[in-house]
Image (cartoon, rainbow, N blue to C red):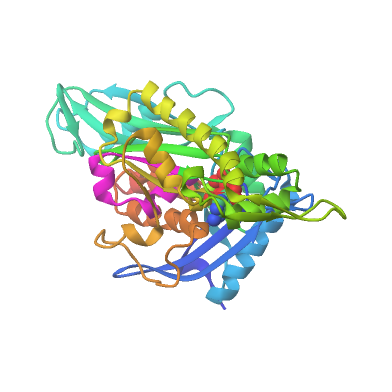
Amino acid sequence: MARNGELLVGLDIGASKASVVIAKRAREGLVVVGRGYAPLVSAGHVTLSDAVRYGAVVDLDATTQAVRDAIREAELSASCSVHSAIVALGGTHIRGVNTHATIAPRRGEVEPPDVERVLNAARSVALPSGRVVLHVLPQEYVLDQQESIVDPVGMVGARLEARVHVVTASESAVKNVARCCEQAGVEPVEFVWAPLATAEAVLTDAEKEVGVAFWDFGAGTTDVLIFYRNALRESFSLGFGGSCITRDVAFGLQTPLHEAEFIKLHHGCALSVAVEDHEKVEVPGVGSRPSRLIPRRELAWMIEARAEEIVRLLWSKVRELEVDRYVRCGSVIAGGGAMLPALDRLVQGVTGLEARLGATRDSHRGNGTEVLDDKFSRDPVYATALGVLLLRARWLDQPYDRFLTRRGWWEWTRGRLREFWRALWV
Ligand SMILES: Nc1ncnc2c1ncn2[C@@H]1O[C@H](COP(=O)(O)OP(=O)(O)OP(=O)(O)O)[C@@H](O)[C@H]1O
Ligand SMILES: [Mg+2]
């Protein structure tokens, strides 16, 4: 059995599940060779797990078990043993801020160490204690008064400014996710913010260039990321997701949570007007009570109220931050929650801009990275884990790679040792 040395392993720890994608790099792109999935089961509740709340692990054992099961399934399907993974994590403890820093290039001409220095300066701006930097994502460089520079190396100037989007996370939340992985026998070599990975799997380069609002509807959180000119301009999360909708349905229909989840998945709709008058839904009775039939429109009302509230809240934040001007080609919705019928129409109605349902397969044709697995096309369960690998493949080709993500301690130490030996060599 092969070890995962030459394979890339992406692990997504969401509020409702752990999912794993194993891929190998081929000349044409990434070839998916295995995958695994396990729902998070905490206190007997499947898919409404309280093991991960708002993205922070609160039940270590349940989360560890889900990671272990998903890894085992992926190992079996890929016939390899996994000992390390790039881990996607999410939640409201993760925050993105726009910041900038300025330095004077040492020799008048911008050299790679100058770019490293300015990114380092941007990274250390106003980081409160207890928080760690996950990503430093360059938006643009300004050299003297010249703006919108993508790569300033080789250019002449006296003042180099980097404008970046810094994504930070709660240190303890990251440590707890790392602990789950380690207890499941997987070393986390790198952490990636989950919606950033999903966006990589789902958006096209053209959309990111023209300007798009990306919505990741998860179980515990809904995230919005605004891309423009191939850079992340703004991002935020709300601690409401699919679980909230399920809870509303359970409350509204007076039925247990697992039944409400089933009803939502099979009969749910985000728009009551999209439901026909004659459609009926069977609601199982509690205990020995008989089941009853209700109009499907009644269910849609409950779902629509919460879904619209979530979308309106997030869109008002987009407008408040004045980044709606970047959203030139509308919205792309993804995550498990986006499978709710008519959610794209709801988003379209609230934003007044076109919205489409994003699927993994759409984006990678012609991008240089092909995901070569037709069976594995549209399942949103794997979009984030796959996106992690696509991001890694993209970042490998970029300079200043180490600023882009937060590596595990071993990767970090190895990087420092490499820099030390390189310095001695020169
Ligand atoms: N067909 C469907 N209709 C409605 N909702 C769905 C459907 N399929 C999945 N969902 C919902 O999507 C959510 C799970 O989505 P996803 O797997 O993206 O979440 P997660 O990654 O576990 O959570 P988070 O991103 O918040 O950490 C659940 O709330 C589930 O009810
Ligand atoms: Mg998710």
In the image, farthest residue toward the right: 288
Determine whether 163 is above or below 230 in the image: above
Q: In what quadrant of the picture does the N terminus appear? A: bottom right
Residue at 61 percent of width and 43 percent of height: 298
**Could you tell me if residue 185 is visible in this image?**
no
Determine whether 77 is above or below 298 in the image: below
Residue at 37 percent of width and 25 percent of height: 319
Give the image quarter of residue 226.
top left
> Magenta span: helix, strand or loop, mainly?
helix
Residue at 49 percent of width and 53 percent of height: 339
In the image, farthest residue toward the left: 156
Residue 395 position, x and y percent, is: 34, 50
**Could you tell me if residue 170 is visible in this image?**
yes
Q: Along the line of sight, which residue is nearer the eye, 150 or 198?
A: 198
Determine whether 340 is above or below 118 in the image: below
Residue at 82 percent of width and 51 percent of height: 286
Residue 240 position, x and y percent, is: 58, 36
Q: Which residues are magenta?
A: 194-215
